[in-house]
Image (cartoon, rainbow, N blue to C red):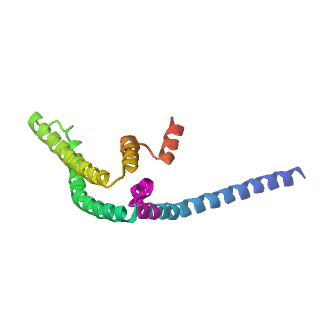
Amino acid sequence: MNEQRRIRFFLGIIVALVALNIGLLTWIWVRPAATAEHRRNRSSTAGTFLADTLQFTQEQRQQLAGWQKAYFQQVEPRRKRLKQARKAYFHLLDSSLTDTHRRELVTAFHRQAADIDLITLTHFDRVAAICTPEQRTLLNKLLGELPSRAFRMPRSRRAAADSAR
């Protein structure tokens, strides 16, 4: 009798572990689809975030859409070059490089980053020009929060980092 209880107990544990494994595998397989859907939704609304937040009129939205398209066409090639320059920048630990060569690489990297920043500032100057005074106040508030948002770790990664500590 005691042996049958032990067998049932272990069978129950095995069934529970199998169910947990099935659930975990299902969650892993379904999660990428949900993440892809979130990215799809995010990319479709990313262009309207500013317009929605500032409550732009239809005319303002059209102007903003044109400027955003031009902005991204202008910035994207520069971002690719900046990414390559960043890779070169982090190869500066190579002891065979001279200080002059390192200085050139650092200067090129920062010059490219500055070019992108200037284009971005010009873009937001254009956006501010079509804003009403109330919209401009809100835009200034959003732009003031931008540096802290840009370097903020996503919630999921922040939780993982906190639990690792």
Please state which of residues 42 and 126 is positioned toward the viewer in this rendering: 126
Residue 89, percent across and down? 21, 43
**Residue 53 included in the magenta stretch of the image:** yes
Where residue 109 sits, quadrant-wise, is: top left
Q: Is residue 44 found left or right of 73 in the rendered image?
A: right
Q: Residue at horizontal 85%, vertical 55%?
A: 4
Please state which of residues 117 and 121 is positioned toward the viewer in this rendering: 121
Q: Residue at horizontal 64%, vertical 59%?
A: 23
Q: Residue at horizontal 41%, vertical 60%?
A: 48
Q: Residue furthest left?
A: 100
Q: Residue furthest right?
A: 1
Residue 6, percent across and down? 82, 51
Q: Is residue 128 found left or right of 163 in the rendered image?
A: left
**Residue 45 included in the magenta stretch of the image:** yes
Residue 138, percent across and down? 41, 46
Please state which of residues 45 and 79 is positioned toward the viewer in this rendering: 45
Main SS of the magenta segment? Answer: helix
Q: Is residue 135 visible?
A: yes
Q: Residue furthest front?
A: 133
Please state which of residues 3 and 99 is positioned toward the viewer in this rendering: 99
Residue 162, percent across and down? 51, 38
Q: Is residue 88 visible?
A: no
Total numbered circles: 0
- Is the residue 110 above or below the residue 7 in the image? above
The magenta-colored residue range is 40-56
